[in-house]
Amino acid sequence: MDRRSFLQLGGITLAQAGLSWLPSTVEAGASALAPGALPQGSADYTLRIAPVTVELDRSHILSTIGYNGAAPGPVLRMREGKTVSVDVVNDTDTPELVHWHGMLIPPEVDGTAEEGSPLIPPHGQRRVQLTPSPAGSRWYHSHAMAMDDLHKGAYTGQFGFVFVDGGNDPGHYDQELFLAIRDWEPFFTGTMDDEDDDTHVGPFLEKPATLNTDPGGLEVGSMTYSINDKALGAGDPIRVREGQRLLIHFLNSSAIENRRIALAGHKMKVIALDGNVVPAPQMLDSIFIGAGERVDVVIEMNHPGIWILGSTEKPIRESGLGVVVEYAGQHRQKQWVDPPKAPWDYTIFGNANSNSPAPQQTIEMIFEKIPGGAGKFNLWMINGKPYPHEKEFMLQQGTRYRLIMRNRTDDAHPMHLHRHLWELAELNGKKTSGVIKDTVVVPYFGRAVVDFTADQPGLALFHCHIQQHMDYGFKALFRYTGSAIPNPTE
Ligand SMILES: [Cu+2]
């Protein structure tokens, strides 16, 4: 059975099972809107940005902004290399941007104001054409700035999966699930609980000799959570049978926090990071997933029961971050079991020896936090400056770069470079190769080293994927030597 017919069969089975937590899937050519909602000659896909209500459970019905009447938006399935058009309709009062995270596409369609992508005006629309690449789990989300408005940008329900089909999936699984981890109802807080920042492996290579002990600014916290649009216990469980294999695409769509996730009673085999197959898949008790990252796992359903898949932090899980996994014929209470604690270490998924070309040039970055440096909030600096940098990071077409990220702050930051792929070279001094990513969590007081080839001309934004950090300085532009400065009013 080829993958397409397999998926269609799977879709029918799931639909019959009535699994409402599964986001709807839109194939090219199928508009998610009612016929006649758009002018003739509509695009392959339509995304309509508009207010939505999300019922996490009976007592949490939220009002936010979403895509096509839901949050998350539909899973968009695209074929690698096959150009598609997307109509983005903005039914809100604020300018918006749809960013295609993890795709190798030009800045005009990347959906990032800093790169010169045009804004979609309030009550306006824009058609973008893009050629999806590379294959794997990608996603789309608002790239609008939010600053001190927690009802804008990535704090809203504007997010969804894009799955780019490379045409070579052997389909060794019985169910394919897209699960987006999410927090809601953000608020400002003076006390951040950083229990999830357990990324630490090895020495604190970047811990400053003297720490700035000024009182910190307000950060963003949240109090309700979900997987896709349902809190733990609400909506339908994931229904499985003993002997099945589940392929789960996880996405951390949070604007706020990194998370650790486990399925009680089971191990997960990590097969891809940020949608890219890893050289050395690993069987783990839990996964760590930074804001913006994706992790693909395969799970053997070999332990019948009623289990919780969710956050390893009890208060977060009990505030909604989880979903019940129910074996057929089981009628007991849902069960959680704490997985053993283990540091998250990207290097275990890599090769010892690299086949990749050696980097020709090195770019050094130092990340620092000025507590309360942005008034009520913290200010974030790269090489001593918040965005914008007078002297941007210059790239030469075809050159392979080594980027050294030195995190001299006490938070783990999920750093993302648009329109390029990184190969992880080193994490806290531990070498690796072959792990291809677009977002890397740089551990607190730690160091991550990535290599990449400058092969995507035009501006490329680099930033922390925590919205507040990005909004208050934690971003930078890479510019290609000789590339024209685009006119954002085009
Ligand atoms: Cu950050």
Image (spheres, rainbow, N blue to C red):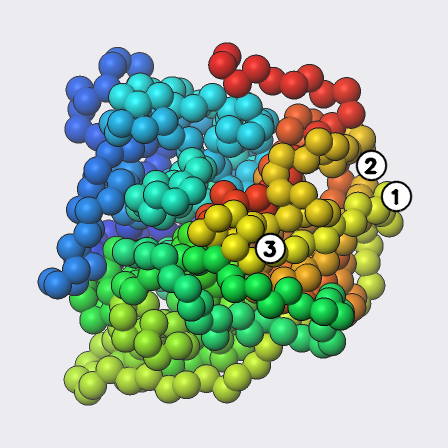
Measured from the top left, where is residue 218 in percent x and y? 43, 58
What residue occupies the far left of the structure in this picture? Answer: 58
Q: Is residue 206 above or below residue 313?
A: above
Any mark on residue 399, and which?
2
- Of 216 and 363, nearer the camera is 216
Q: Is residue 101 left or right of residue 345?
A: left
Measured from the top left, where is residue 243 in percent x and y? 37, 77
> Would you say the residues marked 1 and 2 are in contact, meaning their CB atoms lie under 8 Å apart?
yes
Classify mark 1: helix, strand or loop: loop
Badge 3 is on which residue? Answer: 370
Q: Is residue 403 left or right of residue 467?
A: right
Badge 1 is on which residue? Answer: 360
Label 3 sits on what residue type?
Ile
**Is any part of residue 172 visible from this angle?**
no
Q: Is residue 462 left or right of residue 251?
A: right
How far apart are labels 3 and 2 at the CA level? Answer: 34 Å
Ligand 1 resides in the quarter of the picture at: bottom right
**Is any part of residue 113 visible from this angle?**
yes
Precedes in sequence: disc 3 or disc 2: 3
Q: Residue at x 55, y 51 (%)?
A: 373
Classify mark 2: helix, strand or loop: loop
